[in-house]
Image (tube, grey):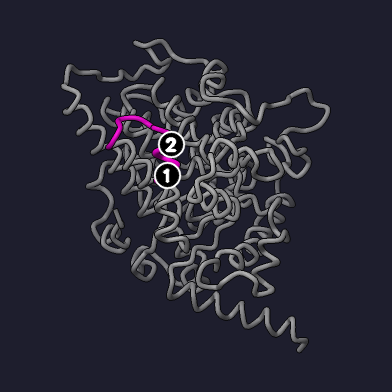
Amino acid sequence: MLPGVHDFVKRLAMIVILQRQVRVDLRVTQWANQFGKVPVVAWFLGEVPVDQYTGWLCVALRQLALASTAVLARLAVPRRHGDYSCLDSLGHRPGTGNEVRTESPVSNLLSLLKLAPTQDDGSTIDFMRTSMTAADANAERSARARLSLDGLSIGDGFGQRFFIPWTVESATSANLPEAPWHYTDDTEMAMAIVQVLERYGEIEQNALAQTFANRYLAEPGRGYGAGAHELLRQIADGADWRLVSRELFGGQGSFGNGGAMRVGPLGAWFADDVKATIENALRSSEITHAHIEGQAGAIAVALAAGWAWRWNQSDRSERPEQMLEWIAELLPESEVAASVAQVSDIPLDAWAFDVAREFGCGDQVSAQDTVAYCLWMSAAHLTDYCGAMWTAARVGGDVDTTCAIIGSIVAMSVGNDTIPAEWQRHRESLNW
């Protein structure tokens, strides 16, 4: 065996061991843009310490798994929202006239949104406003956010186990994946959002950026993507997040699914205020995702979490399909908005594998090929948390993230009591 190949095999064996011992999640942000570039090559050549950057080799491993899913999906059914391999560096197809701005301050993006009137958000579910004191309101909001966080983190840990081959082969409802279910960066960043909301009552961007960086430095092996490693290290070193976020991926900013994966608890916090949901979802995503697609994905998931809570509080009087239609109307013009509008036409009793083939299930780790599928799955399983998790895990793709997003939404419609106690015990304790 050639020395270089032998060294690669040894590193491959080492990462399999680490997966069992050190809570390494197999994730990569926008692998299509990042795979093969300097950080990954540097890891292969031994120029990056193993104990700090095991995630770089995970990039290569996970790309192999996700690529097979992507190829099968394209061979089966062309997606309604299009093939993203033909998008240019700005995230749109040349010659279509659908140019999308990649750098939009929150104030400018809000002007693009079809915001609902204060007293009527376009759905028939009331906001159920009360005359509670500010302290009472924040206590209730915190309880909602932590409920969504439970759904997110349990889903995250559950889904993460399905990157291990023997879990896929052996796991059933009677034989749960082996505990503990270690959570990933999805949960880490969601916890940062909850911490900032509980301290400030809204998203204070500088505080959130620093909290993201602090939590990253404490546990960098939680499976952060390549772009997140780069950005969070720079923020920790004192860089302005406004600049480094926009410089990612050749200056286009990230359109990954990271803004969406962590935002469910924010949507739960602001479930009684749609305008605040949109504004704060944008603020939370802008720190790491300067591209409008990444921001639109965050808005969509936050709105879904709030809708699910209101649906449950209003005797479930609305059709679940209306959640998708309503969200699509509130999103800024984007691929994400188009795919959410299109997936709203898919019957909720359709086969989830068909929906994933058509709209993606995170195999490209982008907001465009993750969010519509997750919202459809949530609508189809609004009363069945465990069913949603098992279905998402069997479909595949970016499983920890799809389970996290779906879990953060469905938890709001079913309540904590319907998440089995055994599942809650299997997830590792949250490190606040």
What residue appears at the point 32 percent right and 32 percent down from the top-left corner?
A: 269
The secondary structure making up most of the magenta span is helix
- What residue is pinned by disc 2? 206
Q: Could you say where residue 28 lies in the image, as x and y percent from the top left?
A: 59, 56
> Which element type, helix, strand or loop, lies under badge 1?
helix
* 413 vs 120: above or below: below
What residue appears at the point 55 percent right and 37 percent down from the top-left corner?
A: 372
Residue 5: in magenta span: no
Q: Quadrant of the N terminus?
A: bottom right
> Which element type, helix, strand or loop, lies under badge 2?
helix
The answer to whether 40 appears left or right of 137 in the picture is right
The answer to whether 255 appears left or right of 24 in the picture is right
Q: Quick one: 407 or 182, which is closer to the camera?
A: 182
Q: Amino acid at mark 2?
A: Asn
The image quarter containing residue 383 is: top left
| Mark carried by residue 210 | 1
Label 2 crowd bin: few (<14), some (14–19), many (20+), radius 10 Å: few
Q: Amino acid at mark 1?
A: Gln
What residue appears at the point 52 percent right and 19 percent down from the top-left corner?
A: 107
Instruction: Give the magenta part as a residue range.
Output: 199-211
What residue appears at the point 68 percent right and 58 percent down from the top-left corner?
A: 67
Cα separation between marks 1 and 2: 6 Å
Q: Could you say where residue 390 lies in the image, as x and y percent from the top left?
A: 43, 56
Q: Could you say where residue 87 lies in the image, as x and y percent from the top left?
A: 75, 38
The image quarter containing residue 226 is: bottom right
